[in-house]
Amino acid sequence: KTFKGADFTKKRLPRAEYENCVFETCDFSDGYLDGQNLMECIFTDCNLSNTNIANTTFKEVQFQHCKMMGLHFETCNPFLMDFTFTDCRLNMSSFTGMELKNQKFKDCKLIAVDFSNSTLIQILFDQCDMEQAIFSNTDLSKANFNTAYNITLNPEQNKLTSASFDLKSLPGLLTNHKIKVVGS
């Protein structure tokens, strides 16, 4: 089923299992998407900012060109959690304490997103703005930051085994040491 241009800010999406559904230009902002089961769904050009997503199941869900600021993904149902973000604004959202593997963030704004105490194995941050993103006690093993930018994280407070970074990210990895890196 396709939902196009629907406003779920005042009247919530009926509680159900949604499989292979498309949500296009829908507005969920400051609304409720809690307790839903979303499987193999696509959200395109939707506004989900400050939406309650507690106990929601996201299985193979794609978010494309969505505004998703202030979401607390750690309140979601962790069972079978799998999502991909493409050209989304996730500013001030939280993934605190989550265990995610092979998730993809492409062309996203991740400004002031909290990844503290999370296990983020083989995560791809492709062309993502990581300004003020919070990494503390985060396992970033095999994470790919090669094209991400505005990264600041302390390697001593995070696990970075086999994580990859572009040379331009070096200053953000040395901020804690007050070392100034000058390029040519």
Image: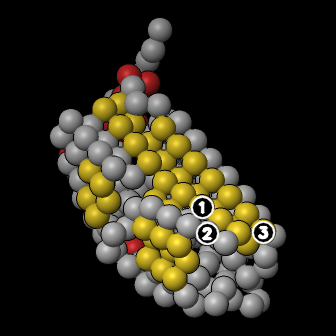
Q: According to the image, label 2 marks what residue? A: 21
Q: Earlier in the sequence, mark 3 or mark 1?
A: 3
- Quick check: marks 3 and 1 in contact, CB under 8 Å? no
The location of residue 74, given as percent across then percent down, is: 40, 74
Residue in view at x 33 percent, y 50 percent: 102
The residue beneath circle 3 is: 4
Whether the residues at callouts 2 and 1 have beta carbons within 8 Å, the answer is yes
Which amino acid, mark 1? Ile
Q: Identify residue type, mark 2.
A: Cys
For marks 2 and 1 on the same chain, the one whose residue lies earlier in the sequence: 2
- The image quadrant that residue 115 belongs to is bottom left
Q: Picture coordinates of residue 63 (x, y %)?
A: 58, 58
Q: Secondary structure at mark 3?
A: strand
**Which part of the image, by quadrant, shows the N terminus?**
bottom right
Q: Nearer the viewer, mark 2 or mark 1?
A: 2
Residue 11 visible in the displayed image: yes
Question: In the figure, 100 relative to 166: above or below?
Answer: below
Q: How many residues crowd around disc 3 within 10 Å: few (fewer than 14), some, or many (20 or more)?
A: some
Q: CA distance from mark 2 to mark 1?
A: 6 Å
